[in-house]
Image (cartoon, rainbow, N blue to C red):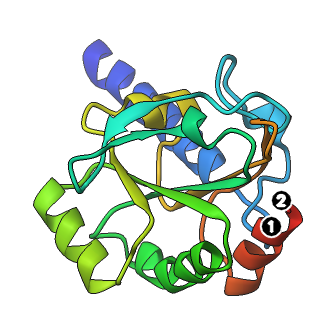
């Protein structure tokens, strides 16, 4: 009986945490970032955590190599329907001259490669094979997009795909 009660309490706690972590305002940002933030994770105004990963093409991907330029970092997976909606917008952002890095989140590399090819994605794609990049940025679900200013600080963050306009507006605000 005691074990069942403890398991039930734990399940309620986990469900409450997951629901709170998904709460967003209409534009994809969280209405109360401070209340939902985790100490030590990337937040607006913080330096964007640097990372080095292997790209889908086998080449190294390193955020710090883009210092001095605005960068859009998008966490995605081939199985994520909203990610599929974002890719044409990310292509537009990339084609407009803003650096984009796609971080493959919890996906099979061959599936991610096939999806990126299908979507004609020509920007850098980093494989986050052990989840290190996602943990550094506090990503627990996708899609999530970070907008990094040319000074290397996080200017904004979208916790989900809301609209083409929201992505485009934030990317243009980086210039």
Q: Residues within 10 Å of mark 2 (few under 14, many from 20)?
A: some
Q: Secondary structure at mark 1?
A: helix
Residue 99 or residue 72, whichever sits in front: 99
Give the quarter of the image for residue 33.
Answer: top right
Which residue carries the number 2 mark?
A: 174
At x 23%, y 56%, the residue is: 57
- The residue at 21%/48% (across/down) is 58
Q: Left or right: 52 with respect to 42?
A: left
Looking at the rendering, which quadrant does residue 25 occupy? bottom right
When asked about the image quadrant of residue 34, the answer is: top right
Locate residue 123 relative to residue 73 in the image: left or right.
left
Q: In this picture, is 98 found above or below 133?
A: below
In the displayed structure, 146 sits above or below 138; it is below
Contact, CB < 8 Å: mark 2 with mark 1?
yes
Rendered residue at 68%/83% (across/down):
163
Q: Which mark is residue 116?
A: none
**Residue 79: image location, x then y, percent:** 27, 70
Marker disc for residue 170: 1
Q: Quarter of the image containing the C terminus?
A: bottom right
């Amino acid at each position: 009986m005691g074990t069942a009660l403890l398991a039930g309490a734990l399940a309620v706690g986990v469900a409450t945490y997951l629901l709170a972590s998904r709460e967003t305002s209409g534009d994809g940002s969280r209405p109360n970032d401070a209340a939902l933030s985790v100490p030590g994770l990337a937040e607006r105004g913080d330096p964007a955590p640097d990372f080095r990963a292997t790209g889908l093409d086998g080449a190294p991907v390193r955020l710090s190599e883009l210092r001095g330029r605005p960068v859009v970092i998008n966490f995605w997976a081939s199985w994520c329907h909203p990610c599929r909606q974002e890719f044409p917008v990310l292509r537009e952002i990339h084609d407009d001259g803003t650096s984009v890095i796609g971080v493959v989140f919890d996906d099979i590399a061959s599936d991610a490669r096939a999806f990126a090819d299908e979507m004609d994605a020509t920007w850098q794609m980093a494989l986050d094979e052990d989840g290190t990049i996602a943990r550094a940025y506090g990503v627990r679900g996708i899609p999530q997009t970070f907008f990094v200013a040319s000074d290397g600080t996080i200017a904004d963050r979208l916790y989900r795909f809301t609209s083409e306009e929201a992505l485009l507006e934030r990317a243009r605000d980086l210039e």
